[in-house]
Image: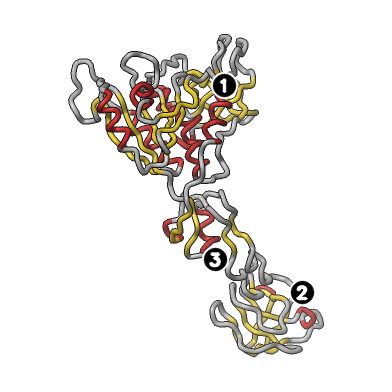
Amino acid sequence: MIPVAEARGRILAALSPTPLEWVGLERASGRVLAEPVLARRTQPPADMSAMDGYAVRAADTGNGQPLRQIGESAAGHGFDGSIGPGETVRIFTGAPLPEGADAILIQEDAEADGDTIRPKAAVAPGTYVRPAGLDFREGDAGMAAGQEIGPRNIGLLAAMNAPWVPVRRRPRIALLSTGDELVRPGEAPGPDQIISSNALSVGALVAKAGGEPVDIGIAPDRPDALAEAGRRAGGCDMLVTLGGASVGEHDLVQEVLGGKGLDIDFWRIAMRPGKPLMFGRFGDVPLLGLPGNPVSALVCGVIFLRPAIRAMLGAEDTVPPLRRGRLGRDLPANDRREDYLRSIAVSADDGPPMVTPFERQDSSMLSVMSRANALAVRPPHAPAMAAGEPIDYITLDHLA
């Protein structure tokens, strides 16, 4: 068995980013940039008013003399001219300052009598002025390669006049379920069969990570069926098998695909749940063999598959970060495997979140996995721990 960090490192080192493609900004949310996006204009393009009032020369507001209004400037309809000594222009929020003006006298600080405007107080140069380029200038990098585009970025890219953006193509992840015991949801299972859940749950994880899940079906425990299913993964960026990666006589993935071009890098990881995890290449396609137990498949999806997809996208957030919490209950000493305990993490006003592992950690219990929002992480050979001690955890927010 090899350590988790080594296994993940070997997986990521074997992957390459997907090709670049251009998408319209209206379809860019959730995509990962392949190249920096540079501003195509300056924002604001000119000095703009931040308030309703009067565009003035600041020097004219402190001498007690009235000003003469000579025009108006509104957003989209600027004043076509300049102001001289003793002159002002009525201005509204978002309107460009006329030439010669250097400040805004807000309307609350002015008395208007027809075209005669009396300042109630002096203003300094730059008052309530948004200078040209305050937000960004033409050529500035608005977003860097590897950043994921979200709602807070869409407006920036639009303001930068970037109607199309370069992103990484979504990795196509083929999902192959294996086993005579599986039937699809909605079908009537036989007396010794169960409902196949892994392709749907892992497929949802793939989509959340930015990939495109491709369900290529359920392969029964027959060499010919498994070999045929493996061929259906052609054209995908990764083949993920669900089950069949262990050493039982019915676990055929290694045996069958090994004769069809599967080159195994490693299998068996020093972790719980998820020891029978396999990685290699099936022809030109990277192959990740996840365990058949549904919780093991999801946990390994978080630890290995999601980072693989993020790496293929060239994303910044490849490896799930460890956070620090406080243990919510006593735990016994750990054995030689790194442990990922399904847990509830609750924020606390007086310190780090309280992380409480569920009492039952059986890798077949999807009800526990469904309620968990964190994985408490314990290193190999960790000593017994008491409630209140610090513990590392991984959030499952991205699975919500």
Q: Position of residue 314 (x, y in %)?
A: 54, 46
Examine the rendered structure and indicate whether residue 385 appears above or below residue 99: above
Foreground mark, 1 or 3, reads: 1
Separation of residues labelled 3 and 2 (CA atoms): 27 Å
- Left or right? Give the position of 152 relative to 283: right
Q: Position of residue 151 (x, y in %)?
A: 49, 53
Which of these two is toward me, 39 or 11? 11
Identify the residue at horizontal 63%, vertical 66% (top origin).
139
Q: Position of residue 72 (x, y in %)?
A: 60, 85
Three-letter code, disc 1? Pro
- Left or right? Give the position of 70 relative to 296: right
Q: Position of residue 149 (x, y in %)?
A: 51, 52
Secondary structure of the residue carrying tag 1 is loop
Foreground mark, 2 or 1, reads: 1
Q: Residue furthest right?
A: 63
**Upstream in the sequence, badge 3 or badge 2?**
2
Three-letter code, disc 3? Ala
Secondary structure of the residue carrying tag 2 is loop
Which of these two is toward me, 326 or 69? 326
Q: Which residue is mark 1?
A: 3
Q: Quadrant of residue 135?
A: bottom right
**Upstream in the sequence, badge 2 or badge 1?**
1
**Upstream in the sequence, badge 1 or badge 3?**
1
- The 10 Å Cα crowd at callout 2, few under 14, some 14 to 19, many 20 or more, is some
- The 10 Å Cα crowd at callout 1, few under 14, some 14 to 19, many 20 or more, is some
Secondary structure of the residue carrying tag 3 is helix
Three-letter code, disc 2? Pro
Q: Which residue is mark 3?
A: 159
Separation of residues labelled 2 and 1 (CA atoms): 64 Å
Please tell me the numbered disc located at residue 125. Answer: 2
- Left or right? Give the position of 263 relative to 347: left
Examine the rendered structure and indicate whether residue 43 appears above or below residue 200: below
